[in-house]
Amino acid sequence: MRWKVRTRPIPRADRFTSPNIDRRADMCLGIPGEIIEILSDRPDLARVDVCGVKRAINIGLLEGEELGAGDWVLIHVGFAMSKIDEREAKAALEFLEGIGLAYAEELAALSDSNIT
Amino acid sequence: MRFVDEFRDADKALALSAQIAALCEPGRRYKFMEVCGGHTHTIYKHGLEDYLPDTVQLVHGPGCPVCVIPMGRVDDAIAIAEEPGVIMTSFGDMMRVPGGRGSFFDSNAAGADIRMVYSPLDALKVAQANPDRRVVFMAIGFETTAPSTAMTMLRAEALGLTNFSVFCNHVTIIPAIKAILDSPDLRLDGFIGPGHVSTVIGCRPYEFIAAGHGKPLVCAGFEPLDILQSVYMLMLQLREGRCEVENQYSRVVPWDGNLKALQVINQTMALRPYFEWRGLGFISHSALAVNDRYAAFDAERIFDVPGVRVADPKACQCGEVLKGVLKPWECKVFGTACTPETPIGTCMVSSEGACAAYYNFGRFSRERVKQATRTVDIELSSARP
């Protein structure tokens, strides 16, 4: 004779997730933002748009880069760390699109084949 | 934010997953270390391990700036915060890191004035607004954050502020990777290189890993697909017999890094002869201190810092987790005595810490697997009469 062991229900994710885990700023992480304008009275500061939030950040670390409205930068603890190359971003995206397509084609070819 | 949205794409992840599986050599197991805590966070949050074949394992490295701060440094910072007239400012992640005598939160509750800031420039604002107080910024982080601290000191100098100083705990990633490579506990096939540290130092400093240690490294971005693509690039290198440093995150990381950022670090800081890392012990030339020229902004010279070394709690196995020897759930106190609400070790404090990331995201899928295996039938004969 066999017995089935009943186990406790799986805990609900929201009950165990720390409430502030994602609200706390991840200090190591950078977020991309789009420059709205370089402040005319403080050329080392720029106003950026991050997900609709507009705030001033320091762009002193990107000295020598040509920055202007519409450029994307990576922001970390109030400083622009790197100018994001939009062309590069698109290229990376295309690579992924490319293999996605290859994969989709492979799948389509497989489902079309009939070897029986 | 359009990049981020486009990159979160499950069918592309599946396509990459199939490509990775196709590169696996039969009978071979692969172990890659993601050095950066940001990657650990993404891996657990999006369940990326489910997209990888069983033979490909990701282990978590020491790249979580909060996790590697030893307890003694927290005690030192609290000692500074308790000096009369001091306002201590710190990033939010640091507030719950336990020292030998409690955390910043405990000290704040006991009466010390400790404030959370988003940026070191906010700390500078606090100093300007409180000219009669001494404002100290608790500087932590790898090379990503060090230039911000350096720029803030330069700004403080330009403003002529005399009530602002920095308690410098900045660490450098290369000596930590060296320590891992020299550690006998771990056999790795390659590294997923930190993305944002590399925006500052570039990809060149990693070349010794490929040339001297024979391990490939790919600098990776923080989106789920970035990480899967980096694993794919590592597997491709192994398959083709190459061993190189590659840059998957080239849309953000320039190969040469940010020279201006390196220059401001060099202008205001100097390498310490050695620094203690939680779990990894003392590592030579692995941290930065404020240099002699900017001594006026160095909290370690302004205040009397006890500098006592505090041993980690015996039960805590953060050291093994940070070196990638143990997975978070293999730690003795994980999820029982040590939780994000009452952390014993630092890996449970920061959301980039491997334990906190796993506790919050990863363990549910694992628990489901465990549940499924536990509902196995038990022979009545093995039960007691």
Image (cartoon, grey):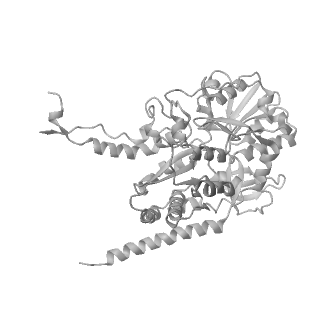
Against B8, residue A111 (above or below) is: below
Left or right: B209 with respect to A18? Answer: right
Dividing the picture into quadrants, the one containing residue B140 is: top right
Total labels drawn? 0
In the foreground, A109 or B217: B217
| Quadrant of the drawing holding the N terminus of chain B | bottom right
Q: Quadrant of the C terminus of chain B?
A: top left
Q: Residue A50, can we see it?
A: no
x then y, percent, for residue A96: 52, 67
Percent from the top left, x then y, of residue B154?
82, 44
> For the point 46% across and 54% down, which residue is it?
B48
- Find residue B114 and report its image quarter: top right
Check the image and report above or below for B285 versus B6.
above
Percent position (x, y) of residue A45?
78, 52
- Quarter of the rendering containing residue B304: top right
Is there any visible trace of residue B40 in the rendered image? yes
Front residue of A36 and B248: B248
Using the image as rendered, state which of residue B301 and residue A67 is in the foreground: B301
